[in-house]
Image: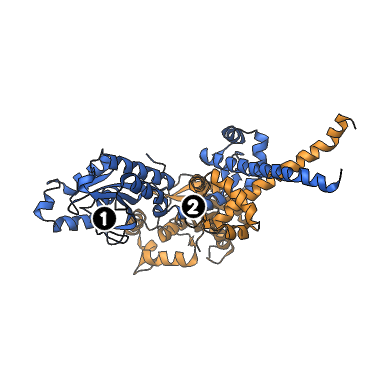
Chain colours: A blue, B orange
């Protein structure tokens, strides 16, 4: 059989097969690594092999490579394997990438398209709740908010979510200042005995804040908190629209969709609570 | 050629070769993953391929697997790859394993053997600096400390390290209470104008605290802080011995060895500062 013809017939499939095997091997290595994470970051060889559904001998070969890479360590006393320094450093780099603005992008687009509302992500800035990313529908409601806009702490849905979830003196001070500056009509919307406390409790109970004509006349808004891997609220997801065509009740379609998307983003940010 | 003989001659080396290739493939996958971490957790294919010294086509194949495992994501707008949620969760599990007591074990043994001193790891407990792990040489100095012992905030080397590095009201309150309870001889050892502040500054400048007969008569001690991935001091590494055969100067052999081991442990805990 001539050399050329054999090579043309057999080598490409063989190389393809080899590549597939190599990719498969890499996948097994990753499964062992993430499997150790799922077991809390420390496990015996037996437990880890059961977790990834491979033989202990095979898992052991991959653990040797993972140890050489510093991703896994082995406890001399107990022989258990644990996630090592490189895994920790990997996590720190991943945390720097777990940015609420970036992670919420797809949710903003989905909310805008499904509900035809203006929606945005806001964070607690040094002047108050601040819009950092906004998506508007094809026919936007004319609202004077854009990226960089600072919202009311006490009268916006966004501010109320931060007030209810962030335990920070700056947040409380801003809310108290706005309460003092409020007119009789505004104060009448709040609990007379415990205006801020009652507001916080109702937002926590509903898992979102809703306002109708409170902050801007003719505008309703619903807002829900975004939590990250530390378990702390790091941003707020808000939808707003003209009060006429927008259901601002905590059980309405907008609030339900918003809470769902907020949960999705929080999961992407590494939030594992609740 | 008989079937048996061929199998006996060729199959084991072929299987061995295949295994080696598979392990190599897993190692390349891990190199791509940790390489992305080293680039700050986000990079283009070109930059990542350069980082791991492989062809972009090869790196891309591994990235596809890493994306399927959720360890890596790709930004739709910029096409850049970033460390994904599974990498973040891996890091969180690794952080739970980055325990100062466990990570300091090898350092305690090295210090005990090299210097023939008693050495321990202490953390800030609710009653004060508390020993959580202790190693004693073959002929221990008779010192009444063991795992669980609570040390002085102001008069022990261990307490002074916590006082100088932990910015916590409980730490300051304990130190002030001990200062008020001090007799004239004890007070004479401290700065008359700013007893606590001067102590903090000297410990920070030296990177360790040293005491000679201050806390226990006839006993000298040197202590250095252990930092973790958050950049915060999480524990203290301390060596102590009879004042006669122990050099407690900040530039002495004990202090140098202790600071070196404290740095080693901090690195294992993910500390990347200084």
Residue farthest right in this picture: B1
For disc 2, the marked residue is A94
Left or right of residue A185, residue A26 in this image: right
Q: Nearer the viewer, residue B46 or B169?
A: B46
Element marked by disc 1: helix
Q: Position of residue B237 (x, y in %)?
A: 51, 54
Name the residue at 42% across, 44% down.
A267
Q: Quadrant of the C terminus of chain A?
A: top left
Left or right of residue B50, residue A272 in this image: left
Residue farthest left in this picture: A184
Q: Nearer the viewer, residue B96 or A247?
A: A247
| Contact, mark 2 vs mark 1 (Cβ under 8 Å) | no
As measured in the structure, the alpha-carbon distance from the residue carrying label 2 to the one carrying label 1 is 28 Å
Q: Position of residue A183 (x, y in %)?
A: 11, 56
Q: Which mark is residue A93?
A: none
Q: Would residue A157 be visible to someone looking at this image?
A: yes
Left or right of residue B200, residue A246 in this image: left
For disc 1, the marked residue is A171
Element marked by disc 2: helix
Q: Position of residue A113 (x, y in %)?
A: 35, 47
Tell which circle, 2 or 1, labels the residue nearer the N-terminal end: 2
Chain under label 2?
A: A
Name the residue at 45% across, 65% down.
B204
Tell which tag, 2 or 1, sits nearer the viewer.
2
Above or below, A58 relative to B224: above
Q: Would residue B113 be visible to someone looking at this image?
A: no
Q: Quadrant of the N terminus of chain A?
A: top right
Name the residue at 83% across, 33% down.
B7
Above or below, B250 relative to B109: below
């Amino acid at each position: 059989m001539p050399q050329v013809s054999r090579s043309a017939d057999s080598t490409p499939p063989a190389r393809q097969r080899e590549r597939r095997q190599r990719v498969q091997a890499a996948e097994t290595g990753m499964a062992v690594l993430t499997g150790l994470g799922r077991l809390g970051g420390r496990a015996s060889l037996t437990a880890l092999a059961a977790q990834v559904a491979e033989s202990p001998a095979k898992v052991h070969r991959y653990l040797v490579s993972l140890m050489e890479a510093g991703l896994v360590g082995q406890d001399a006393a107990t022989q258990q394997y644990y996630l090592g320094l490189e895994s920790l450093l990997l996590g720190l780099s991943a945390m720097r990438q777990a940015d609420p603005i970036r992670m919420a992008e797809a949710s903003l687009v989905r909310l805008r398209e499904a509900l035809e509302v203006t929606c945005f992500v806001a964070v607690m800035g040094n002047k108050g709740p601040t819009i950092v990313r906004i998506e508007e529908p094809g026919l936007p409601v004319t609202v004077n908010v854009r990226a960089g806009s600072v919202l009311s702490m006490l009268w916006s849905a966004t501010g109320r979510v931060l007030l209810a979830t962030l335990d920070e003196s700056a947040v409380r001070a801003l809310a108290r200042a706005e309460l003092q500056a409020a007119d009789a009509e505004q104060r009448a919307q709040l609990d007379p005995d415990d205006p801020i406390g009652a507001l916080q409790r109702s937002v926590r109970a509903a898992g979102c804040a809703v306002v109708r004509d409170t902050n801007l006349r003719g505008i309703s808004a619903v807002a829900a908190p975004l939590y990250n891997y530390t378990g702390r609220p790091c941003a707020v997801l808000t939808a707003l629209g003209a009060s006429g065509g927008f259901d601002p009740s905590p059980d309405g379609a907008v609030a339900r969709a918003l809470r769902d998307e907020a949960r999705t983003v929080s999961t992407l940010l590494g939030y594992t609570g609740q």
